[in-house]
Image: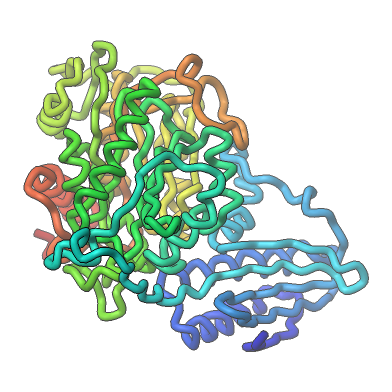
Amino acid sequence: MRVLFQLDLPNADGSVAIAQAACLRAADQLRLAPEKRMRLELAVEEVVVNAVRHAYPSGVSGSLRVTASVEGAVLTVRVQDWGLPYDPSEITPFSVEDPQLRGLGLHLAWRCCDEAVLRNLGRDGKVFDLRFRLPPSPVPVPEPAVEAAAVPAARGAGRVEADVRLFTPADAPGVARCAWLAYGYSKPDDHLYDPVELARLNRDGLMVGIVAVGGDGEVVGHACLDLSGNPLVPEFTDLVIVPAARGNPVLLGRILQLGYDTAVARGCLGVLVNAVTAHTVSQRGALRFGGVPIQVHLASVSPEWDLTAGSGKEAGASAGGKAAVRQSEIALYCRNRTGEPRLLHCPERHRAMLRSIFAAFDEPVTIADAVPPEPASLPPASDLLVESGLLAWGHVLIDVQAYGQDLIPSVAAFLRRFCQDGVATVLLQLPLGDPATPAMADRLERLGFSFAGIFPQAVRKAGAPEKDAGPADPDHDRATDIILFQYLNNVSIDPGSERIVSACQPLYDYVVAERRRVDREFYALSGVE
């Protein structure tokens, strides 16, 4: 273990900035990516502030020790105090229903780290260990020894022979190795690198894994149906293929086919595919199965994710292989069966685009021509669900389940706090079945949100969500159509660096134009075309 620094500080407010400055200096020495550097700064701030304010009784002087060390490929920042003992279970859990947002600071700190641990050391006080992986570059994978007849000379590495089948628990270590060979530790999905967690998610029905296994028994590709949020329309995600097996459309097509067939067998309405704009492979794969572009998440992909590892440089990649700017994602909906006929209410400005999207997959919806007036009366409180599970990617989701008189100030308050905490993008979901949505959407756009797309048949849990509630139950949960908006917090988009196939271009151009319109009208940004 190599110690980078050790600071002994008083429990005073000024210690926070000193600890942050030292940690950022260490981050620069270690060449942390800008987004991980920002997450380190936020985590250190929240934990040191917590120690300064709560470790010792009011009026009692005490000391803190902040230490940074590197062991292997892990940076650990330890914040130690010798104040009042307490059990980790006594920490106030964060709840979006708490108007004071107690516990949000430590909740965000935990989310910013790759791993966080609180330990009591008896007479040595207690420590918070904040751990951050230092992603190595993926190692080159030797080309497998296969018969010349099995490998066309023009596309050598991409023609690895593989058996595509459903995941078994014995595949978990191989999937983790596959993810590392594909992207190092740069992909912000911790479960992909954790064999125990991969096995648990599949066992508990939260995902259905699909693996491609080479002739030597090694996993060379992986994808899954994520059932944790919406079993009616699961996301096809976690696609990783080792560099030696890339460039093989047949292998990719077989993985996609098994995923789609599995969704059909489960009775799903469809499958959602989030395709990155750093390349066109996943976009074309979803289109091959009848995918319709329904959303564009601008600047949604962390620049820390090495999207081009092992496959050569493409547009949008920096010299180090990682994206020079935050890349976007295009969500495509591959429909299996239609939903029930329904009436939807959308903002007048976006009505033509929504009609075009729904018509593309022939969904039986009617979009009201008239915009209903703003409701004369609403209940005092809105029903909001805030999901921060994607903080590693830099986003937070605010799901408006029911409108109340406090909607605009409540969303503005959350937005202010998330921006202060360095969240890159905030997504906002509104129910298209509610006649109040057109009026509310116009007001929310004045906060800086811009149109991002729709989500047909999104699942809403019946009643208040519970912690670790597990997958949604189609027999008890309700489905509704969603219109999606997004807020960009000091992050920029570079359409020139993104690669869009022609079928996705109209929606992409519309979403970019709406982002620029909001920037011009509500931020008075000059020079925005």
- Where is 326 relative to 81, above or below? above
- Residue 447 place in picture, x, y as percent: 32, 46
User: Does 384 sit above or below residue 488?
Assistant: above
How many marks the image carries: the answer is: 0
Residue 8 in percent (x, y) is at: 75, 84
The answer, for residue 525, to whether it is visible in the render is: no
83 or 2, which lies in front? 2
Can you say whether 392 is above or below 100 in the image? below
Farthest residue to the right: give it. 123
Instruction: Tell me what residue is drawn at x 60 percent, y 58 percent.
Output: 110
Residue 377: % across, % down: 40, 18
Residue 472 in view (yes/no): yes
In the depicted view, which residue is nearer to us: 129 or 321? 321
The image quadrant that residue 422 belongs to is bottom left
**Which coloring applies here?**
rainbow
In this view, the residue in front, 327 or 487, is 327
Q: Residue at x 73, y 82 (%)?
A: 9
Taking 314 as reference, is 386 left or right? right
Tell me what residue is drawn at x 54 percent, y 56 percent.
Answer: 173
Q: Nearer the viewer, residue 367 or 150?
A: 150
Quarter-of-image position of residue 364: top left
Left or right, 181 with reference to 464: left
Q: Judge from the rendering whether residue 296 lies leftward or rightward of residue 225; answer left or right.
A: left
Q: Quadrant of the N terminus?
A: bottom right
Instruction: Indicate the quadrant where residue 66 lies.
Output: bottom right
Q: Residue at x 36, y 35 (%)?
A: 429
Q: Position of residue 14 (x, y in %)?
A: 65, 78
Q: Which quarter of the figure is the C terminus placed in?
A: bottom left
